[in-house]
Structure formats: C-alpha cells, structure tokens
Amino acid sequence: MTALSVFGVDIGGSGIKGAPVDLERGALAEPRHKVLTPHPASPESVVAVVKEIVDHFGHRGPVGLTFPGVVVDGHTRTAANVDPGWVDLDAEGIFRETLDLPCTVLNDADAAGLAEVSYGAGRDHGGVVLMLTFGTGIGSALFIDGALVPNTELGHLELRGKDAERRASAGARERHELSWADWAVRVDEYLDLVERLFSPQLVIIGGGVSRKQEKFLPLLKERPARVVPAELRNDAGIVGAAMAAAKNAS
Ligand code: BGC
C-alpha cells in the first residue's frame, strides 16, 4: 500500500509556495513550486494561485494551507498584513470547493511550529516551547509538551506603545534601515516581554530572517530560555501545513 500523498501550501506576503510532503522524513517530497503573491492578495486571486500550484504537481489528496492571520475552524478571522477580504471568511470551504480536495487551513506560525517541534529544533523537547517567526510580521506558536495552543498572535503584544511587530519584525528592520546590532536590541526587548509572560524553556527563531541567523543570534543577550534557530527554514510552513492536513484526514 502506498502512503497517503499529502500536500502543503505556504501562503506568505511575498510568495505562495507548495510541494508534496514526505511526512516520514518531515521534508519536501519534490522541489517546491513558488508563485509570487498577487497584489492585492484578495481571496479570489490567492485561491487561483493555490490551484495553479496544486495542479502543477497533479496532486490528488489532502491539502494543508497556511495563512498569516488567526484561523479558527477553517475560518480566517484577521488579516494584519494581507487583504482585508480575508476577515471572517470560510477559507477552508473556498479552497475545498475550488480544489475539489480535502483542505485544512491553519495559522502560518502554528504550521511552522508544528514542523519544528516534530522534525526540527524542538523535536523531543517537552515543557513550554515557543516558536517565533520574524518576517513582515512576527508570528508565534506556543507548545506545551508538544501540544499546540493555536493562534497566540504574540506579534501583536504591545511594546513601547506599539504593536510589537511594528518595532521588532524583520520587516521593521528593513523599513527603519536598522543595523543588525540595533535590531537585536529590539528583538531582545521583545523576547524579554514574551519571556516574562510565558517563561518558555526553548525559543525557536524562524521566518525569512532565520536564513541570516548568524548575523543576529550571536548578538542577542543571554537569557533563561535557550534561543535556537529554526532548522527547517523555508520549508517549515509547507511541512507543518501537510502535517495538519494528514491529521485531519486520518
Ligand atoms: C499575523 C499572524 C501571523 C504573523 C506572521 C501577524 O501579523 O497577525 O497571524 O502569524 O503575522 O505572518
């Protein structure tokens, strides 16, 4: 009997990428296919791109999809960095109808966290583990003994009277043209805040900026939590999305 073929799609602000996933290895089964995110990233245009990506592989089987906002029971509830047309939308239903395949939608950082905790920097780690993704925004995924508390949205904690992601995301570093050292100070301030609230034993730093971890991780100060880079890098969202789809299909 062949294993169930599961597909993951990562919907991001700059690109939408997908691939079939090998869930035994926690890795892509084939090189991913990426299409630039349409602008505006309205539900209709994103759904059309997702269909193109899934069709590119001729995939038939469950599909997991990440979304950069709150997702409850397949409904997208917020859209901080994407088109407002996603607010309060039955996204799962729309993907299912368009693709004619079983679909599961979850928050992007939650998906990346699931992958890291199962196959990457957080594997075999009990206790409180926090995955943070630094990209356009800041995403978060909180785990207790491997179980996810979804939609924690810690990027929107208040830091110096602002949404934390406006100050400390990788996007903020670029917007304000901060040096790595100046940005590391902001990230430390943000980590102080989340550490005060959740006392995680392990913090996994992911998102687009994890490619450049050697530029800023050594600049961060010592803290009680161990702070480590994500291991799956760019593929974490796709792998985590496929994990969620496989779980729903079983
Ligand atoms: C959104 C989160 C998302 C994060 C990373 C934030 O602005 O509110 O849901 O996980 O960006 O994309």
Image (spheres, rainbow, N blue to C red):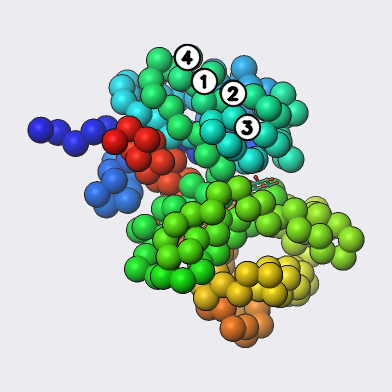
Q: Position of residue 73 (x, y in %)?
A: 54, 33
Q: Which residue is mark 3?
A: 76
Tag nearer the camera, 2 or 4 = 2
Q: Which residue is mark 4?
A: 97
| 244, above or below 76, in the image | below
Q: In percent of the image, x 44 and y 53: which residue is there?
A: 114
Query: How busy is the neighbourhood of tag 3: few (under 14 within 10 Å), some, or many (20 plus)?
Result: many
Circle 1 SS class:
helix
Where's residue 100, x and y in %? 40, 15
**Quadrant of residue 32 within the rendered picture:** top left
- Mark 2 is surrounded, within 10 Å at the Cα level, by few (under 14), some (14 to 19) or many (20 or more) other residues, namely some
Residue 154 percent across, percent down from the top left: 68, 57
Task: Using residue 148 as the reference point, say whether residue 239 is left or right of it.
Answer: left
- Marks 1 and 2 close (CB-CB < 8 Å): yes
Of residues 20 and 73, the one nearer the viewer is: 73
Q: Residue at x 23, y 33 (%)?
A: 4
Q: CA gap, disc 2 to disc 4? A: 11 Å
Using the image as rendered, state which of residue 36 and residue 163 is in the foreground.
Answer: 163
Look at mark 1 in the image and give the residue it sits on. 93
Residue 32 visible in the picture: no
Can you tell me whether the CB of the residue at mark 3 lies under 8 Å from the nearest atom of ligand 1? no
Dot 2: element: loop
Q: Amino acid at mark 4?
A: Glu
N-terminal-most mark, 2 or 3: 3
Q: Amino acid at mark 2?
A: Asp
